[in-house]
Each structure stands twice: as C-alpha cells, then as structure tokens.
Image: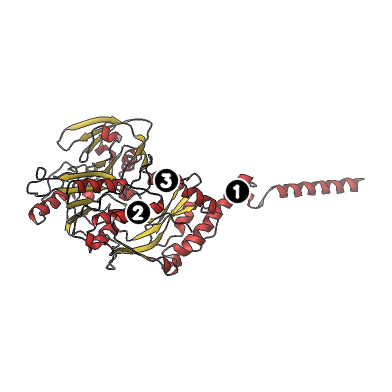
C-alpha cells in the first residue's frame, strides 16, 4: 500500500506540474484575449501594407528602406519612422481624425494666433530682438475678438512677466510658455498683457477656443495712392496661408478663397498683385494648380510649370503639369467632386510680387519656382524653407469597401494616413528647388511690428518698386525693448515652422493603390 500511495502521489504531483506548465505561456506573458489578438493582427497587417505596398515601391528612396520585422510590439508611427531614409526630413504620417481635422481647417484648443520672434528672421535685421510678437490672428478667433492684432508684443502671461519664464541658462520655463501659447488648455482663461504697436498696454483675459474653423485666405485687399503715395494703379494683396482644396466644416470648398479673391481683383482692375506666402507651409496640388492658372499670364498657358520625377520603379508615374486657363482648372476639379462657380477668366496680371520667409514651403516654393520663368515675377522677403519634393496621400485601410466609403466622403473608418516622399519637383526649365530654400531677389526681414498694410517692410518694398521702379534699401534697425533670459542670452520661442516636424508639404491626393 505504501508503494501504491507513493506512486499515486508522484502521479498527482506530475499532473499538477503539467497543468501548471500548460497555463503559463512562453515568455511569462498572459494569454492574449481575443480582442488583443485581433489588435495585434491588425497592427501587423498595417505594417505589412506600409512596408511592402508603399515604402518598397512608391517611396522615393525605396532602395534605402531598412528591413524591419512586423511586430505588434511596435506601434505604427514608430514603425513608419523607422523605415525612413536618413536624408528624409519631410515624410510623415497622421491618424485619420487628425488628418480630417487638418484638411477641413479645424484647429483644436487655440487662441487663434501665431507667435514669432523678430530675431529668428534669417536676415538678422532684428538680431538682438527676442520679443514674443503676434505674427497673425485668425478672424473670429478668441484673440481677434479681444482686439489682439499682428505686432502686439506679449509682455506678461498670468500676471507674470515674460522675462520670468526664462530664469537660468537652461531656460526650463521656455517649454511652459510654448505650451501655454501653442497648446493651450480650454478649461480656463489666461490673462495676457500686450504692448500694442502704438505703445498702449492691453490686458485681456482669454480662454482658448475648443475648436476654431479657419480659412486659407488671411487677407485680401487693394492698395491705392491713398495708402502709398506714387501709385498710379491699384495694387492687389493676397495673403494665403495654406494650399487647401477640400470642404471646410461648413461644406464650403477651401478653393473658393482663391476664386473669390481673383474675382475681387478682377472686378477692381488689378494688374499688379502681391502674393504673400511667408507663413504658407504648402498643401494640395489642386489648390496650387488653380492658383497658378490665375496668376500666370495668358502667354504661359500650355507651358509646363512643374515636373514630378519619381524613383526608377515608379518612372511611369512621372508627370508634367502645364498652366491651364482657370475655367479648365475648375472643370478638372469635378473629378475630385469639387464644384466651383466659374469666375471670369484671370484678371490678366502684368506684374507679380511674391513675399516669402522661412515658413514658405513645398507648394509655396513649387508655385514660385514654376512661375518664375513664365511670368513677370519679383521675389522679396527671406529664403524659403527648402522642400523640393512631394508626397502622395495614402489612406489606410485601403480595401475596396474602405475606398467606396472615402469616395462618398465617409471617413469614419479611416485609421491612418501615410505621406511618404514619392517624387521631386522641377519647373518647366528643369530647375529644382534647393534643399536650403529659394533665395529672394531682394532680402527683407519679416517686419512683425507692422500689420499687413503699406507700412510693413516687405509690402512697402513692393509698393515702392511699383511706384518708383526700384526697391528701397533695408532701413537701419530701430532700437526696441527686448526680452532676454536672466543670463543675457537670447531665448527662442518656437513658431509653428520650428516646432512642427511635419511643416511643409506638397501632396497629390487621394492616391489609392
């Protein structure tokens, strides 16, 4: 009996050990639930699509893409960036909802203003001036309603001097200021003190808007001799912030900002136009095609203004785009289900001025580079951002059912949007955009202390050339009250083109495999 009892005990213990081993998976991890298994499979499927369909074919540097195993332990964004060629500082991706909000001009959690520092201008005109200044304000935004305009200098935030945000050599509070201004909380208002361009101090309590609908056109106006002595003809001014084509949150196409502006200039017999792209980071080729169709002279129609050159695998996609008449460009937009009222033909501009800065990127540079050989165009301002290439927009998921939804404007299932560099741009003469940006004919700094009127340095320079046939010299810097860190070193506030790693894009979309 002792032998039987001992045998039974051994068998019982072995059975317990076996059961215990079966319950514990390899690696010591818990057995994934069904939902987790589905998530892992979906992630690896997305990685496979990204690597094998996009990066190994369409990506301009497909032969430089490293091998990366598909793994549920790597999120899709990390996986995407791990595939990029070391030279590539332009490709990016977004989640579906972020992309849709961006395309419809909806900004979340914002005061509706852009900030910058005069010292950041490439010309060094304001080299010692590190004030934080309002660059522009969106119409209808909280700051607009509070009376804040371009040129207002931020002197205090929440009753603390801006100087106090910079306490030592490491400037640990700089990120705090950037966060408060660039990514504000909508939960509570903040108290701002500004010094207005006329010297008056203005203190306001403002809460960020939970959402703000924006448009691509910031300003359109006409200058006459009443604004600038010596003008013998009206001069148009068009400040265009982004090349957008899709409908906004109210269902109105962003392209209407172009057609409405051009109709306005045509009705007022404007033959000289200043196109201000200094804060325009690029966008949709449909918008650039339409704008170029209005800006180019009639003699340029049918001539190539941009070539798109792909890698050797996708050379069949190489394409040249010629200047069209506006009516033809509008007709072609119907393929994208965009219907615009056909305004009269181009105003027939005889002279164009382009104002750029380091925020001018991608489609802005492409339009400038393409029009230069075709139009009477003068380029002023600062060197552009340097984005000589473009991307296709790839939606994911990308199966037939998903495509059918997207074609109907239903993006409820859109999970990821990939924007890898797929081609390089050149103009009709084969001239490429330099990686370091396009240098203007005449260099002027971004004059933050004046609004977009005849007193602002770049606009005034253009008007002076119209009136006098020559550009004025850059005036000597004026002494201004500056804000520096406690140790005397300049502190740099991050404007959008500095802080946004995705700044600058020229896209052709939508693109389905």
Q: How far apart are marks 1 and 3 (CA)?
A: 26 Å
* Quarter holding residue 379: bottom left
Task: Please give left or right for residue 405 compared with residue 380 in the image.
Answer: right
Residue 402: where, in percent of width, then height?
52, 50
Task: Please give left or right for residue 265 compared with residue 102 in the image.
Answer: left
Task: Name the residue rendered at 55%, 54% in the picture.
Answer: 44
Q: How crowded is mark 3: few (under 14 residues within 10 Å), some or many (20 or more)?
A: some
Q: Counting residues from the N terminus, which is met first, the one under dot 3 or under dot 2?
A: 3
User: Which residue is denoted by mark 3 in the rendering?
Assistant: 100
Q: How crowded is mark 2: few (under 14 residues within 10 Å), some or many (20 or more)?
A: some
Task: Name the residue rendered at 35%, 39% in the picture.
Answer: 213
Residue 259: where, in percent of width, then height?
28, 48
443 relative to 139, above or below: below
Q: Counting residues from the N terminus, which is met first, the one under dot 1 or under dot 2?
A: 1
User: Which residue is denoted by mark 1 in the rendering?
Assistant: 38
Q: Are marks 1 and 3 in contact (CB under 8 Å)?
A: no
Give the colour scheme of this rendering. Answer: secondary structure
Tell which tag, 3 or 2, sits nearer the viewer: 2
216 relative to 91, above or below: above
Q: Is mark 3 on a helix, strand or loop?
A: helix
User: Which residue is denoted by mark 2 in the rendering?
Assistant: 331
444 relative to 130, above or below: below
Q: How crowded is mark 1: few (under 14 residues within 10 Å), some or many (20 or more)?
A: few
Q: What element carries label 2?
A: helix
Q: How many labels does the image show?
A: 3
Residue 56: where, in percent of width, then height?
48, 64
Tell which tag, 1 or 3, sits nearer the viewer: 3
Q: Can residue 345 be seen in this view?
A: yes
Front-most of 188 and 41?
Answer: 41
């Amino acid at each position: 009996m002792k032998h039987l009892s001992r045998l039974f005990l051994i068998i019982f213990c072995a059975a317990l050990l076996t059961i215990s081993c079966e319950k514990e998976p390899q690696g010591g991890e818990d057995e994934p639930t069904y939902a987790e298994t589905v998530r892992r499979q979906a992630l690896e499927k997305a990685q496979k699509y990204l690597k094998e369909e996009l990066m190994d074919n369409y990506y301009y540097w497909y032969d430089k893409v490293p091998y990366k195993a598909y793994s549920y332990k790597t999120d899709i964004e990390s996986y995407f960036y791990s595939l990029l060629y070391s030279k590539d500082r332009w490709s990016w991706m977004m989640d579906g909802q972020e992309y849709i909000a961006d395309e419809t001009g909806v900004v979340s959690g914002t005061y509706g203003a852009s900030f910058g520092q005069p010292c950041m201008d490439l010309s060094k005109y304001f080299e010692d001036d590190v004030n934080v200044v309002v660059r522009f304000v969106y119409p209808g935004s909280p700051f607009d309603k509070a009376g804040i305009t371009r040129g207002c200098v931020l002197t205090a935030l929440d009753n603390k001097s801006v100087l106090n945000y910079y306490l030592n050599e490491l400037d640990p509070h700089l990120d705090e200021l950037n966060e408060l201004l660039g990514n504000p909380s909508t939960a509570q208002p903040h108290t701002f003190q500004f010094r207005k361009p006329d010297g008056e101090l203005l203190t306001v309590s403002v809460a960020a808007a939970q959402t703000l609908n924006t448009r691509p056109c910031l300003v359109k106006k006409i200058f006459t001799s009443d604004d600038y002595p010596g003008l013998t003809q009206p001069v148009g001014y068009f400040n265009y912030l982004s090349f957008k084509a899709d409908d906004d949150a109210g269902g109105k196409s962003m392209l209407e900002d172009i057609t409405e502006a051009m109709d306005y200039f045509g009705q007022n017999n404007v033959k000289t136009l200043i196109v201000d792209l200094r804060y325009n980071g690029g966008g949709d080729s449909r918008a650039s095609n339409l704008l170029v169709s209005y800006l180019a002279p009639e003699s340029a129609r049918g001539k190539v203004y941009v070539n798109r050159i792909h890698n050797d695998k996708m050379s069949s996609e190489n394409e040249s785009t010629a200047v069209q008449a506006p009516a033809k460009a509008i007709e072609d937009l119907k393929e994208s289900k965009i219907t615009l009222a056909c305004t009269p033909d181009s105003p027939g501009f005889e002279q164009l001025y382009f104002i750029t800065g380091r925020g001018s990127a991608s489609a802005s540079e492409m339009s400038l580079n393409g029009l230069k050989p075709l139009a009477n165009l003068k380029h002023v301002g600062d060197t552009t951002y340097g984005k000589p290439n473009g991307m296709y927009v790839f939606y994911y998921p990308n199966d037939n059912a998903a495509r059918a939804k997207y074609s109907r404007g239903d993006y409820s299932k859109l999970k990821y949007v990939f924007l890898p560099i797929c081609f390089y741009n050149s103009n009709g003469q084969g001239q490429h955009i330099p990686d370091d940006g396009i240098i203007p004919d005449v260099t002027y700094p971004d004059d933050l202390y004046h609004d977009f009127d005849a007193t602002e340095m770049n606009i005034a320079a253009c008007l002076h050339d119209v009136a006098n046939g020559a550009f004025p010299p850059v005036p000597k810097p004026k002494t201004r009250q500056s804000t520096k860190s406690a140790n005397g070193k300049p502190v740099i506030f991050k404007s959008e083109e500095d802080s946004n790693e995705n700044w600058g894009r020229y896209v052709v979309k939508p693109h389905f495999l």
